[in-house]
Image (cartoon, helix red, strand yellow):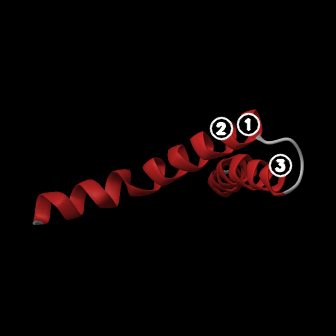
Amino acid sequence: MKHRHAFRRMWGWPIVLGVLTALGLVSALFSDGGLGDVLAWFALGLPVGVCVWYGWRRT
């Protein structure tokens, strides 16, 4: 049980961000306006925002 918690603690958020990125890319590829584009913008923008936030936080 302890090993599973350590794995989730270390890799949980990177996996979530990777899934969001994949969802955003698929949504951008197959959508033609409307809600699909909004989902793509959100799903692709959130990982970028997280990276920028952590980058500024480290400086």
Assess disc 2: are there few (<14), some (14-19) or many (≥20) residues with their C-alpha within 10 Å of its C-alpha.
Answer: few
Q: Position of residue 32 (x, y in %)?
A: 86, 41
- Residue 30 - label: 1
Residue type beneath disc 1: Phe
Residue type beneath disc 3: Asp
Kindly report the distance in space between the C-alpha atoms of the residues bearing marks 3 and 2.
10 Å
The secondary structure type at the circle numbered 2 is helix
Q: Position of residue 3 (x, y in %)?
A: 13, 58
User: Which of the two labelled residues, at mark 3 and mark 2, occupies the earlier sequence position?
Assistant: 2
- Residue 43 - label: none
Count the labels in the image.
3
Q: Residue furthest left?
A: 1
Residue at 58% in and 50% down:
20
Residue at 78% in and 51% down:
36
Instruction: Give the left or right position of residue 6, taking residue 44 as reference.
Output: left
- In the depicted view, which residue is nearer to us: 1 or 23? 23
| Disc nearest the viewer among 1 and 2 | 1
- In the depicted view, which residue is nearer to us: 53 or 26? 26
Is residue 22 positioned above or below 35 on the image?
above
Marks 1,2: beta carbons within 8 A? yes
Q: Position of residue 17 (x, y in %)?
A: 54, 50
Kindly report the distance in space between the C-alpha atoms of the residues bearing marks 1 and 2.
6 Å
The secondary structure type at the circle numbered 1 is helix
Q: Which residue is label 2 attached to?
A: 26
Kindly report the distance in space between the C-alpha atoms of the residues bearing marks 1 and 3.
9 Å
Residue type beneath disc 2: Val
Q: Which residue is label 3 attached to?
A: 37
Residue at 67% in and 37% down:
25
User: Which of the two labelled residues, at mark 1 and mark 3, occupies the earlier sequence position?
Assistant: 1
Assess disc 3: are there few (<14), some (14-19) or many (≥20) residues with their C-alpha within 10 Å of its C-alpha.
Answer: some
